[in-house]
Image (tube, rainbow, N blue to C red):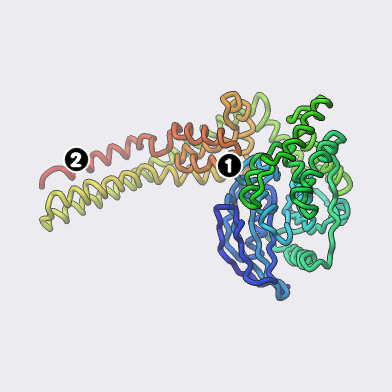
Amino acid sequence: MGLTKGSTGLNAADGGMKIEKQCESDRVIALAGNPNVGKSTVFNELTGMNQHTGNWPGKTVSNASGNCEYNGRNYIFADLPGTYSISARSAEEEVARDFICFGNPDAVAVVCDATCLERNLNLVLQVMEITGNVIVCVNLMDEAKKKNISLDLRQLSKNLGVPVVGMSARSKKGIDKMMEELSRMVTYEHPTLPKKLRYTPVVEKAISILQPELEKILGEGANTRWISLKLLDGDSSFNDSMKEYLKIDLLSNPAIQKAMEKVAAYLEEQQVTLEKLRDRIASCIVLQAEEICMDVVSCSRSRADLRDRRIDKILIGKWTGIPVMLLLLAVVFWITITGANYPSQMLADGLFWVEGQLKTFFEWMSAPGWLTGVLIDGMYHVLAWVVAVMLPPMAIFFPLFTLLEDLGYLPRIAFNLDQYFKKACACGKQALTMCMGFGCNAAGVVGARIIDSPRERLIAIITNNFVPCNGRFPPPYKGKQNCSSALTMKKQPN
């Protein structure tokens, strides 16, 4: 198909804003999408880079970029962090928004999940408000087929006013069509007429108050309508990004301040608070996404779907959800602790036998006592204990934890516990990081990155340290007894 893979290997902590073209003919394409829709898989297929893919939200924190050549033209793809919105309520959303707004990509490819298209269209509609050069890549078409979900992609393209491509990135289906549409878009062979979002009269009136003032400051070429929405949304991080990349402080401008006062007065007159205004903006996007999908998505319930619903009634039921969760976790811990007894004992016996032989060797060499103490009684002894005690439980716990993740049970745990964590001003996602903490506290702390709120993330990081990881579990009695016997034998003089 004329596609040649390559890579630039760029990972920028500042959001990847400094992607440099190798020549003027290069085209920069932003890959956006919700978490866990196969966006990084699409990126890997296009660029040949081994960007790690995972089944948890917030996996991509910075922008990875790679390049490929199609029909003699070089394309640089930026894999943006997974995000549900451009409202920038988290670090991932802020990075994605800033690249689309200030990174000047030639086009944005929004990857969607075919099995839940309606939810994914919220992001598509928001991106289309920023730029018209959008292509929608509906991934996981094979999974949708298994669930008896059929999509009319032609009708979806007509409803959105932008190109739509169906694909299954894991089997490399649709990649060629995607590149073909991108090639036509960046060469202006396929002009787009993206659907314009409609808001309630109150929101439209508020926009009309701010937009003329923004046009005076930014010029008619700027997307003043969308910037007005960001100001109405109270997104202070967007103003910070404007100051950083465009050196413009909108909130400090007297004309903007005066316009915002007019908006506040109008909203007060209409008895609409800023919080209600934000809710109306969000609800308009959701309702229009539903409207677009009405004549696009059709599905028939299969036996597998009905079976899943019956299972969910048990796993997340009001009376059965918590008992089943405690039972499953108890089984995992029992298998971990009991199953670790035997390999721990074998490792302890073997490693401490080697320690005795090394000590005998050092005595035969007449090595000084301080050297034997440092190398054998210190370094080796500690390493042997750590390996014997910690390695077997970790080797059992994490595969079991991964199995629960692959079966889709971990999100159900978060759902079951969310209301209880909320009562403690924490997040239900912390349940997952705490479970990981039983395997290793370091993994539990790092896993807190999936929590959007900085405050709730900090709570998770602090409290996860109190989870007793397997390194704090007492070693198996039988193994400890054998190890103690081995130590006693070693310390006896020859």
Query: Disc 2 marks which residue?
Result: 488
Q: Can you identify the residue that label 1 sits on?
A: 450
- Eyeballing the image, is 163 above or below 310? below
Q: Secondary structure at mark 2?
A: helix
Name the quarter where the N terminus is drawn: bottom right
Q: Which circle's residue, 2 or 1, is located before the other in the chain?
A: 1
The quarter holding residue 171 reads bottom right
Which of the pair 282/337 is nearer the observer?
282
Task: Say left or right for 273 vs 62.
Answer: right
| x then y, percent, for residue 114 | 76, 50
Q: Where is residue 408? Give x, y as percent.
A: 64, 42
Judge by depth and name the residue closer to the eye, 265 or 432. Answer: 265
Left-right relation of 378 to 412: left
Residue 363's place in the image compared with 5, above or below, is above
Residue 106 % position (x, y) = 72, 62
Residue 176 occupies quadrant: bottom right
Task: Return the x and y of residue 238 as percentages of the image width and height.
Answer: 66, 44
Instruction: Please tell me whether mark 2 or mark 1 is closer to you in this view.
Output: 1
Vertically, is 11 above or below 266?
below
**Amino acid type at mark 2:** Thr
